Image (cartoon, rainbow, N blue to C red):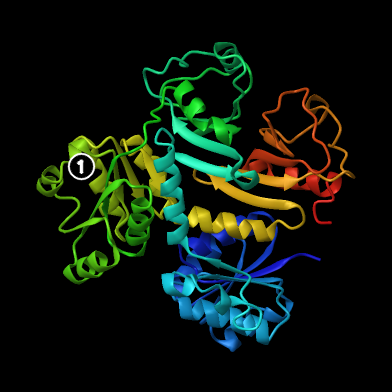
Amino acid sequence: MNMKVIIIGAGEVGYHIADSLSREGIDTVVIDRNEERLHEISEALDVQTVLGSGSSPESLKRAGMAQADMVIAVTDSDETNMIACLLASTQSRIPIRIARIRNVELNGDGSLFGTDRLNIDLCINPEREAVSNVMDLLEFPGAAEVFSFAGGRIRLLGFQIDADAVVIGKKLSDLRAMEPGFKVLITAIIRDEKLIVPSGGSFIEGGDYIFAVTDATRVRELLRFFGKNTEPPRRVIIIGGGNTGMMLALAIEKRNIAVKLIEKKRVQCEFLASHLDKTVVLRGDGTSHELLREENIEGTDFFIAVTNDEEANILGALIAKQLGARKVISLINRIDYIPLVSRVGIDGVINPRHAAISRILHYIRKGKVISATPLRDEKAEAFEFIALETSEITDRPFKEIHFPSGTIVGAICRGEEIIIPDGDSVIRSGDHVVIFTPCSAIGELEKLLTVKLEYFG
């Protein structure tokens, strides 16, 4: 029987979750109060739509709540999301309830969402996820994206190849000879916005954006190998004093990094100053040349723009870069902005929606799948699963297994050992395996894993 999911909220998060699910053949219904937005979704995606409020029992009934396997409430209202999950719990048998809860005070109270209260299985706070992403980038300054697998023991990094990197013009098969004993696997190359599935004969060009997998203990070694900076930051400037900016400042304070936060609103500045210990809070416009120069932007290691205005985040980052900031990062929710941003010289993008989708996909992919992470304009996905002994792909060398086109096994975690595989590698029962695949191959890969791995067992 096909899985059925109800999504409440047709904004950016709701739209892209509906897109991911419908492409995988999951019966998807979207509820929203905005008729125009629902029309756009039904034109673009193969989903059903229901006009109404997600906190209305009648709307949920029309959406087929009685037959649903999951409800995902991602409206801009925490209250609507909580009520929708409560209704799903009390008036239906829906087994999985997911809510976006943005209020930091609510989000921190796990007891509120337990089985005896609201009964929510997963609370997503995109802002908290964004902060976690930024902290990874501060730890590994040469990377533009950092993803963790196998409990943080395997890392997948995304970064651009600089024009003077020594690896330019080298074949991937030559990289290991350049530094024997260092194991790294290139899982994808993005060149001119096209996804290239690499082979040993692929060359690296200046300007390429690559994804590489390695053991978490060797990330700095990987970045140095590709000519990237690994110096930890000493000075950070944040613009935007909302939830994300405040949580980010608190997290950076704990690392003993000097941090300044620029916010326009006087009342918010007062609130921030009373809640932050070591952060210097400044009232002003973070896109002002004059203010940034006054605050020594040319001596700043990281400039991080996390206002609610994406255009201001892009503009602020570009100005900061022009004035001498070493690395600039912008928070951007709109996926269509991301390719543009990397072309104009912004070093890193934080996309809270990616993290939200990743957490939800983990619930969609049943069985032994631990995590699923959409990558780079959602052209590709990395996910982690546990291999079962009943699988035909265990105990066989990779070169004998016919994976879908473009699919690469990035890493294997076996007990304490991290294996960066080659053609002779073998998956054993109980291994944690990280697979990188173009989105176009997900359906085919899932069929392979469903049959061979008892994926839904």
Q: Residue at x 59, y 21 (%)?
A: 182
Quadrant that contains the N terminus: bottom right
Q: Residue flagged by tag 1: what amino acid is it?
A: Ile
Q: Is residue 22 visible?
A: no
Q: Residue at x 37, y 31 (%)?
A: 231
Name the image quarter holding residue 197: top right
Q: Residue 160: percent from the left, percent from the top?
A: 43, 30
Q: Residue 56: percent from the left, percent from the top?
A: 55, 86
Placement of 87 over or under 157, stated as above or below: below
Q: Is residue 223 left or right of residue 48?
A: left
Name the image quarter holding residue 200: top right
Label 1 belongs to which residue? 319
Q: Residue at x 45, y 33 (%)?
A: 159
Quadrant that contains the C terminus: bottom right
Q: Residue at x 60, y 55 (%)?
A: 20
Q: How many marks?
A: 1
Q: Nearer the viewer, residue 21 or 349?
A: 349
Q: Residue 405: percent from the left, percent from the top?
A: 70, 33
Q: Is residue 311 visible?
A: yes
Q: Residue 418: percent from the left, percent from the top?
A: 68, 33
Q: Is residue 419 left or right of residue 242?
A: right
